[in-house]
């Protein structure tokens, strides 16, 4: 890779912009529902026009509140189901309503089936500089079980297009711990993904949420999740495999080829940097306050048509709540937390010694960094602090 | 002197004592029929629910006999449980006669016998009454035969009634008037009044229930309970007519109450004699003794912040229950608490329930213990009711535990099962008696510790409710005792230590280890739970560690939910005790301390 390419691949021009807010757009449409997914989406894509009208109105409510954004993230749902005209209007209005930094990371989540050279060319035109490809697996049987609408061949074609179109900064999403999935099959998926030279990988253990069709199947005994020991093996194997291949394990489920290829947008969630979420069900955070939108396209559109903000609820975080969030979010990343967040009265206790002794965290300078074992226990780790 | 009769009703639990008392009150028209609340005398919630009387109460019933004479009948209610046998004996000492109530379907039971003996000791006139004659299964002739053979009473003197239907009530009242002698006593002698109960009233202080044997008592007099020597000025005297009604004076033979600015019931002793400070009797009335607790347990607040509130609640509770004794106690696992002494297990349960219900306390009680005696190498003897004070085993020369004599009455077909139960509970020296055909009286000497757990419940279940049971403490006997410790990751959980007989230790240890395994949440390391005597491990269970506990995704929309979950978990953690580095929820203590063996 030459120096020019490197610059193209999203090198930070302004490293001081760590605290600039991020903008998230929730596109609540999917052609088909995946039985494991608990993100909010509907399959009636025809509502997209109405949604667009509504989200344009929502933008106008927030025009001057957040200042200059340096990340934009289109997630879903499936952003790639939007028609070209809707996408063009969306981006035009986003730029009209909000200020973006010159070096803005603009990510679009893409379903391999929707990726064509034409779509990618449009994305380029719109300024998209990062793609997140929902591949999930490089095994057709597994894709079938997950009810994905693409095959392995579809993924490979899509990734070929991505390379063709000159998108050098892209990530691939994968799922492990699929019922019946052997470790070897998972390693094969990882290897195949690496073959396309992604800058980023998100590797999620399949989580069976109660409210999903998989959740129902689990309850009825028609599906079996993997056990804790297997989960642990998958997690550690993945971490070791990707680190050996030059990736940095920077968050529980996220890996990047270089520090600069981390998802700048997602880092904002983990670092309490302000973010604005537009669209049904989207969450926003600013100055210790968090609010979230109604989780219904219909209600969302209706409220905005009435000149109202489609907010479902909000909360103001107390200092103690803020600290707890800093703790559990920080402990999910390889940056960890500052020691004075963990021990606000500057009194490290026996609990820290125990955590270090049990190799859950390591102390580096003024920061506490979770180990791999710490990552595995990230949901309990915050409870070990005062 | 007015025509007075003082009487009590004694009966086995469920034989209808409270219902009969209600009918007698109703007959005296003390209360409008419409306002009549069943079982008026049992006015505590727990008494109502359990159908037992805990505190003695009395009521003054005006009655005009068939011959037209006017009487005042004092009904002194007695507690119906072996834990309160001393209170029963003081109530009986205040009477001249008793109604001995026997269930027409159940017949004579062990407690009936015990109560009869108590009444006989006081030379009371005994009027046998067969209750529940309305029931189809009533066996009046059979019960009469039992009354003759087992109790040695004249079956011809027996009255029949159905308290439920109100039949035979006037006949009972007539019999009381005719057969119970009027109280003896001399109003000109110095005052001698027997305290048989004391209750606390938040407005008036302690209301002392007493029977006047000699002399008279008026407001303004200065009285002196003889066992304490303190003096009080009488504010009010009166009689109980469901509510206290003041009278000008109480005189010999009467039953009534005294209000004299006595702050707590602890300042009065049941069985004590009240006399006038200015003109005292030379000798107190006989039979007074200090009530001594036999069962001990520590009470801890579930949340350690609630210690103060528990302390205040106990103090208030104690105002009305002189039998409860307590002192500060502390445990590494459960924090600050109180070591309490109870009259028996029922008393313990009542205290626990009332603290929870009336005082809204969330509490944990440690395993009930009896008082053990240890002879030490230096020749001294120590009494230990708290496992925390178990002496250094190397200095122990002799170990003794209290024994009771259990008196069990069962239909013959259950003899085998009852014998087995008693032998399992280390019963010795059994005797058997066949008072009537088909029924057996079994006597066993048993360690009190074996009875305080769930003996009575077990007896009831193996005899399908037909077995009845009474006991008295007899002596201390040599016994092979050990201290069982429970260790979590090698650290002793002091609140779970118990003193047990060596043969019982393993079973108990296995049960506790298993229960803790179920209740202690998994942590990120392996947890070993062990039962040990000294350094020797006799039971063990293991809690496997978490291998992985992390959700895959946490983005903008997941943060609030996750924080709320953590907040909830953090709150839960505050209520956990830390032993070594293991967090033990209070539920684990509750489970481990449960006494049943299921």
Image: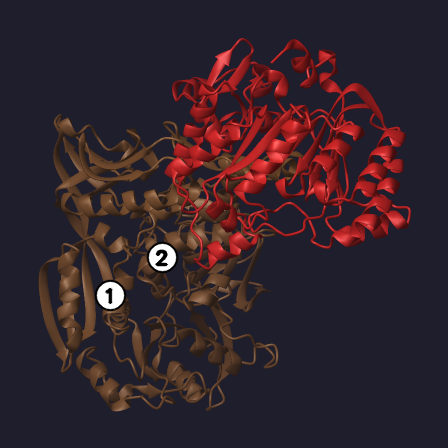
Residue B480 screen position, x and y as percent: 12, 42
Looking at the rendering, which quadrant does residue A317 occupy? Answer: top right
Residue B507 x/y as whole percent: 20, 48
**Residue at 34% over, 74% down:** B98
Question: Residue B485 versus residue B570: which sits nearer the camera?
Answer: B570
Q: Chain of mark 2?
A: B
Whether residue B529 is visible, yes or no, is yes
Q: How many marks?
A: 2
Q: Is residue B236 above or below residue B99?
A: above
Q: Which mark is residue B459?
A: 1
Q: Colour of chain B?
A: brown
Cβ atoms under marks 2 and 1 closer than 8 Å: no
Q: Residues within 10 Å of mark 2 (few under 14, many from 20)?
A: some
Q: Position of residue B456 (x, y in %)?
A: 27, 62
State the SS at label 1.
helix
Label 2 vs label 1: CA separation? 15 Å
Q: In the rendered structure, the residue with mark 1 lies on which chain?
A: B
Chain shown red: that is A
Label 1 crowding class (10 Å Cα cut-off): few <14, some 14-19, many 20+? many
* Residue A232 in the image: above or below residue B354: above
Under tag 2, what secondary structure? helix
Q: Quadrant of residue A276?
A: top right
- Residue A108 lies left or right of residue B55; in this view the side is right
Can marks 2 and 1 be said to lie on one chain? yes
Q: How did the renderer colour the structure? A: by chain
- Which residue is at the front of the view, A143 or B252? A143
Q: Which residue is mark 2?
A: B346
């Amino acid at each position: 890779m030459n120096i020019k390419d490197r610059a193209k691949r999203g090198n930070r021009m302004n490293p001081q912009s760590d605290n600039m807010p991020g903008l998230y757009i929730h596109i609540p449409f999917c052609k088909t529902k995946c039985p494991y997914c608990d993100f909010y989406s509907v399959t009636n894509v025809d509502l997209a026009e109405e949604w667009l009208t509504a989200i344009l109105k929502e933008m106008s409510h927030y025009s001057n509140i957040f200042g200059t954004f340096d990340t934009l993230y289109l997630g879903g749902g499936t952003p790639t189901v939007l028609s070209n005209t809707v996408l063009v209007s969306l981006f035009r209005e986003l730029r009209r309503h909000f200020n973006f930094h010159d070096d803005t990371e603009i990510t679009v989540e893409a379903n391999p089936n929707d990726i064509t050279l034409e779509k990618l060319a449009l994305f380029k035109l719109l300024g998209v500089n990062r793609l997140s490809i929902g591949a999930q697996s490089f095994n057709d049987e597994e894709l079938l079980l997950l009810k994905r609408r693409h095959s392995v061949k579809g993924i490979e074609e899509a990734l070929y297009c991505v390379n063709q179109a000159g998108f050098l900064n892209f990530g691939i999403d994968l799922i492990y711990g699929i019922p019946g999935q052997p470790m070897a099959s998972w390693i094969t998926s990882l290897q195949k993904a690496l073959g396309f030279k992604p800058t980023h990988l998100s590797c999620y253990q399949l989580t069976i949420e109660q409210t999903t069709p998989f959740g129902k199947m689990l309850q009825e005994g028609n599906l079996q999740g993997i056990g804790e020991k297997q989960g642990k093996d998958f997690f550690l194997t993945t971490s070791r495999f990707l680190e050996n291949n030059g990736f940095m394990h920077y968050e529980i489920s996220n890996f990047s080829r270089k520090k600069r290829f981390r998802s700048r947008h997602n880092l904002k969630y983990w670092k309490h940097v302000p973010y604005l979420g537009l669209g049904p069900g989207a969450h926003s955070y600013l100055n210790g306050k968090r609010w979230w939108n109604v989780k219904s396209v219909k209600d969302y559109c209706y409220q905005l048509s009435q000149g109202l903000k489609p907010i479902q609820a909000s909360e103001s975080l107390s200092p103690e709540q803020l600290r707890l969030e800093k703790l559990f979010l920080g402990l999910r990343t390889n940056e960890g937390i500052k020691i004075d967040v963990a021990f606000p009265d500057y009194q490290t206790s026996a609990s820290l010694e125990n955590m270090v002794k049990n190799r859950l965290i390591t102390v580096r300078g003024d920061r506490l960094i979770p180990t791999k074992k710490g990552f595995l226990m990230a949901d309990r780790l915050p409870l070990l602090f005062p | 002197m007015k025509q007075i009769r003082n009487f009590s009703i004694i009966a086995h639990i469920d034989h209808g004592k409270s219902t009969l008392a209600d009918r007698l009150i109703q007959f005296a028209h003390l209360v409008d029929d419409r306002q009549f609340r069943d079982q008026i005398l049992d006015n505590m919630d727990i008494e109502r629910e359990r159908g037992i009387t805990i505190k003695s109460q009395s009521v003054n019933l005006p009655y005009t006999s068939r011959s037209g004479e006017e009487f005042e009948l004092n009904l002194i209610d007695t507690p119906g449980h072996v834990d309160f046998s001393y209170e029963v004996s003081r109530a009986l000492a205040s009477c001249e006669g008793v109604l001995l109530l026997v269930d027409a379907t159940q017949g004579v039971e062990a407690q009936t016998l015990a109560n009869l003996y108590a009444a006989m000791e006081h030379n009371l006139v005994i009027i046998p009454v067969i209750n529940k004659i309305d029931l189809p299964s009533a066996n009046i002739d059979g019960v009469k035969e039992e009354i003759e053979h087992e109790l040695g009473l004249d079956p011809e003197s027996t009255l029949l009634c159905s308290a439920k239907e109100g039949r035979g009530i006037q006949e009972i009242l007539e019999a009381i008037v005719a057969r119970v002698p009027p109280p003896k006593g001399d109003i000109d002698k110095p005052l001698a009044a027997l305290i048989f109960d004391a209750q606390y009233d938040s407005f008036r202080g302690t209301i002392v229930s007493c029977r006047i044997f000699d002399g008279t008592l008026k407001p303004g007099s200065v009285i002196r309970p003889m066992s304490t020597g303190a003096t009080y000025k009488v504010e009010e005297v009166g009689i109980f007519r469901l509510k206290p009604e003041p009278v000008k004076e109480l005189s010999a033979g009467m039953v009534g109450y005294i209000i004299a600015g006595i702050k707590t019931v602890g300042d009065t002793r049941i069985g004590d004699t009240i006399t006038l400070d200015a003109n005292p009797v030379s000798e107190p009335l006989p039979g007074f003794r200090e009530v001594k607790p036999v069962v001990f347990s520590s009470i801890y607040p579930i949340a350690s912040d609630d210690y103060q509130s528990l302390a205040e609640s106990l103090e208030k509770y104690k105002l009305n229950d002189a039998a409860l004794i307590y002192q500060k106690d502390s445990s590494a696992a459960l924090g600050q608490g109180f070591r309490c002494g109870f009259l028996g297990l029922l008393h313990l349960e009542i205290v626990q329930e009332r603290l929870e219900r009336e005082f809204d306390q969330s509490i944990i009680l440690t395993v009930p213990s009896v008082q053990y005696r240890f002879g030490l190498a230096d020749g001294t003897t120590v009494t230990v009711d708290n496992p925390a004070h178990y002496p250094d085993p190397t200095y122990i020369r002799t170990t003794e535990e209290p024994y009771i004599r259990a008196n069990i009455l069962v239909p013959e077909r259950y003899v085998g099962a009852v014998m087995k139960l008693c032998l399992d509970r280390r019963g010795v020296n059994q005797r058997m008696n066949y008072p009537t055909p088909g029924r057996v009286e079994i006597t066993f000497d048993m360690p009190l510790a074996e009875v305080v757990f769930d003996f009575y419940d077990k007896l009831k279940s193996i005899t399908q409710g037909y077995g009845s049971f009474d006991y008295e403490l007899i002596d201390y006997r040599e016994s092979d005792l050990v201290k069982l410790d429970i260790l979590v990751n090698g650290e002793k959980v002091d609140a779970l230590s118990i003193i047990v007989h060596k043969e019982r230790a393993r079973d108990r240890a296995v049960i506790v280890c298993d229960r803790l395994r179920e209740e202690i949440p998994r942590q990120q390391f392996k947890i070993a739970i062990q039962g040990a005597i000294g350094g020797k491990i006799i039971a063990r269970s293991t809690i496997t560690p978490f291998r992985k506990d992390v959700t895959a995704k946490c983005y903008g929309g997941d943060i609030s939910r996750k924080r709320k979950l953590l907040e909830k978990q953090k709150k839960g953690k505050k209520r956990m005790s830390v032993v070594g580095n293991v967090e033990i929820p209070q539920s684990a203590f509750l489970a481990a301390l449960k006494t049943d063996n299921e």
